[in-house]
Image: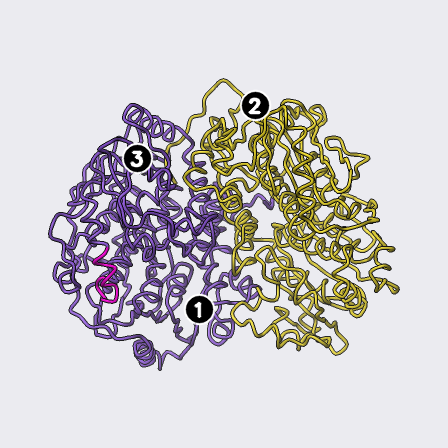
Chain colours: A yellow, B purple
Amino acid sequence: MEHLEAATAAPVRFDTHPSRYVHWRIEVDPPVARLVMDVQEDRPLRAGHPLKLNSYDLGVDLELADAVQRVRFEHPEVRVLVITSGKDRVFCSGANIYMLGSSTHAFKVNFCKFTNETRLAIEDASQHSGLKSLAAVNGPCAGGGYELALACDEILLVDDASSAVSLPEVSLLGVLPGTGGLTRVVDKRHVRRDLADVFSSLGEGVKGKRAVQWGLVDETVPLSRFAARVPERARALAEASPARSGPGVELKALEGRYTDDGVEHRYVSLKVDAAARVASLTVRGPEDGEPASAAGMRERGADLWALRVFRELDDVLLDIRFNRPETGVVVLRTRGDLQRVLASDRALWENREDWFAAEVLHHMKRVLKRLDLTARTFLAVADGSSAFAGSLFELALAADRSYMLSADDGPRLALSPLNREGLPMANGLTRLQARFLGDPDHVDRLAWDEAMDAEAALAAGLVTFAPDEIDWEDEVRLAVEERASLSPDALTGMEANLRFAGPETMETKIFGRLSAWQNWIFQRPNAVGEKGALTLYGRPERPKFIWTRT
Amino acid sequence: MEHLEAATAAPVRFDTHPSRYVHWRIEVDPPVARLVMDVQEDRPLRAGHPLKLNSYDLGVDLELADAVQRVRFEHPEVRVLVITSGKDRVFCSGANIYMLGSSTHAFKVNFCKFTNETRLAIEDASQHSGLKSLAAVNGPCAGGGYELALACDEILLVDDASSAVSLPEVSLLGVLPGTGGLTRVVDKRHVRRDLADVFSSLGEGVKGKRAVQWGLVDETVPLSRFAARVPERARALAEASPARSGPGVELKALEGRYTDDGVEHRYVSLKVDAAARVASLTVRGPEDGEPASAAGMRERGADLWALRVFRELDDVLLDIRFNRPETGVVVLRTRGDLQRVLASDRALWENREDWFAAEVLHHMKRVLKRLDLTARTFLAVADGSSAFAGSLFELALAADRSYMLSADDGPRLALSPLNREGLPMANGLTRLQARFLGDPDHVDRLAWDEAMDAEAALAAGLVTFAPDEIDWEDEVRLAVEERASLSPDALTGMEANLRFAGPETMETKIFGRLSAWQNWIFQRPNAVGEKGALTLYGRPERPKFIWTRT
């Protein structure tokens, strides 16, 4: 049932452009850009559920994700995002409940994961690009709407009779706020836990002075002063952030070719064997002639290999998540020239003070985090002409296991400065630090300056297995087949635990603690059963709960 | 259905004694104590599932919990626990699958929570009492068996044809190891994540040298040398730990009176209103005459108020978890004299270098952690003659909210050194630090030396609400009723997120990340559906999975 629904739906495409936005407008007026949410209720991504009251579905949120990313690359001179509503009487009422209620469990989970990544991207822009954000909350702000505001650096709430911030999920829907709300209330805004408890179990939310006192928003102003106060606060945020100047780099459309069997991009290919539930993902290194200077990179723009290849990879990861729900194993390969990958990495690293090189690095980092969080088994396979070097070797480090062919003229792998820093995981560690958690010095002792063959890589602990030519095919094939035969749920849980050894951060808590609980609740009869609160939302009947506390 | 099964089962009692153990033996030979697991397969806690191959159920595990605690108090001279099997051909095959497969979801979750707390208590004994532990793995060691070994400081594995360590849950049962296995493999033993991935998806496990190389065990020795090697390693561990001398303090039976409507202990009472799904938990402070010196406290032994009251509280918390599955709200009250509670706290704190006072403090700490992890709403209510001071005020800090009566002659609350340190949460913070996460200095500015009335406590942020006499009854009653009406699952998830703001540790990861995922998987058709792997375990049919990756 579940997989049929997902499989028969039209595929979701993530490659978009402001000229094609339906629900958002970007109004650039440096140093400020206003992102205006004006959801067209009759244009949901999937027919059936009008998006009333500025509620959102995936189609709305993927435009927001595109907009935030686009401002970073295309408008480096912008220092502040003002996120506000284009509607008079509502800021945002959160994720559309009817859409959620009628979605498969897998879609709900992946939808929440994507919206979480988008909120974290807003925070990443603030922390790493000095692109600050102000939520100009000009009306009621509920659930996912408040969670969007929570992702901003500052929340300005209009003080009128009706505008409250609220998390009504627990009391009205029998689920949790799915986009980091509980975590950000206590861990980012440091709302006292007992007040957070009151707030999160109170359907109507909190408004006015009390919202400020409790720390739920930063300021409230009467409606009469709201319009003037927003640009004042935006200017103040802009002045506190170091200036950057353009011109920006246009993020051209990727124009991938999508088929039932895969995706074909310039540098990234996905081929899906649906019957085996296995996908082959190949990432190609740069051609000759990648620029080494900051100016050269900016000139190359969206065609710069390092930017383009990770944008393509991002697109393919989202395609796997949303459009290939039964694909359980992704075999990761690379192709190309080790030295060219290393040269590209070095150019980025040496120019990391340049805004564009820095944005490219942060983008790589975010895509690799998306890989870490993708609920599929990744097996890295280094065979023939593979190019697992530097930033591409991070793919193997992010994979659940890696296999490297041991042969006289076999593949090599190599490290670059980007393996040492620059591409941290959500927990703040590099993938090498996470890999050698028990022996931090091991990272220093690695062969930083020379390519390694399979024996050397195995001895250094950088690959899992290094079969020789006789065993190679059987060993890889068996690993893939065996993995594809296991319970997909158990694998998702296992991988979510083994991938994040070491410290936890607010970011990993959102995915590890909050989302896992939310996923649990999303399955419970008390939410999604016939008499569950989510099922019955909007109907006159009251939910019937099984009262067992678990 | 689910709640009926739980309600009709006989209640579980946790107060036990070695003379009544069925499945474990304690063999004390200072500085070593051997805990020998010899599960009587025909004596499960609930009829129906023989406990074959040293597999365990709650009845087995509650004896282990008692044994570890008892050694700390009754045999302070013991420096090493050797945990081993009394059977020839198996160490432990983990939690009994048939018991798990036929249990309610709520029971499974609570069972795993308790076994996790017991494993953490073994680690707490090592870290805080210098009571080291050695898993003497004398045979196959699977699933929960290996997780028990992982809780020990050292794992010694016999090297023979059949003895492997394994986590077969993912591959054989379609669930996760439920007792911290995945987390401890990568976060405690620092097994490389790709090797951990191979190990955790491999039903047959890893043995011999490879188990040592991968870091899964510390040493393997052939069967011929095993019996001699165990005491050698135990002695080495004992020598590395500071000596302590007895005599110990006997943990006398609590002898509570249990009825359908509650539990009556000397200092702790529980009264359950089943129809309202609300329990009233009252904790009474000490009488006059508690000892202030270390010698006096040791002499008072198990009758020392501070030890007895927290043992009683522990017993009642477990009673709520296992025997009152539908009780959703627990109203916490205290009764007694503030100054006597403060004096008891001071005596413990001033004598914290004494082994017994230290054990009492660590016991308090563990019971408060049990409260933090109990999936019920706790509302602290400070009325009339309440005694929320010091260690008892921690109950209010652990509660989700607190209400304090504001009246001229109303209740007071007071702080003791135990609120400042000594009773940390699982995340390493004190409850005051967690409460004022955004303003750490606030803790220093609190009134450490004087009792506070409701106004002062409210102003200091130490209570949530302080209604006056006119509003008091209505406000408390409404809060209880409203809370009891909400979805129990959503509340469990909400509380699990709001209670643990701030850093995460291995301990909180086990409950927050691992258990939440495990709870999710325990609900999935791929595990517990008609064709799920857990359902079909031991039958000839193979599971049928829904392949959607979530």
Q: Are marks 3 and 2 in contact (CB under 8 Å)?
A: no
Label 3: element kind: strand
* Magenta-colored span: B346-357
Q: Relative to A213, is B116 on the left or the right?
A: left
Label 1: element kind: strand
Give neighbour class at mark 3: few <14, some 14-19, many 20+ (Cα, 10 Å). many
Residue A473, image quadrant: bottom right
| Residue A495 versus residue B486 in the image, above or below | below
Give neighbour class at mark 1: few <14, some 14-19, many 20+ (Cα, 10 Å). many
Pinpoint the chain carrying mark 1. B
Residue A500, image quadrant: bottom right
Which one is in front, A278 or B47? A278
Residue that mark 3 sits on: B404
Amino acid type, residue under disc 1 in the picture: Ala
Pinpoint the chain carrying mark 3. B
Amino acid type, residue under disc 3 in the picture: Met
Residue that mark 1 sits on: B164
Q: Which mark is residue B485?
A: none
Q: Residue at x 20, y 67 (%)?
A: B75
In the current view of this chain or complex, which residue is farthest to the top? A540
Q: Residue at x 82, y 35 (%)?
A: A19
| Residue B357 versus residue B437 in the image, above or below | below
Q: Is residue B462 visible?
A: yes
Q: Nearer the viewer, mark 1 or mark 2?
A: 2
Residue that mark 2 sits on: A160
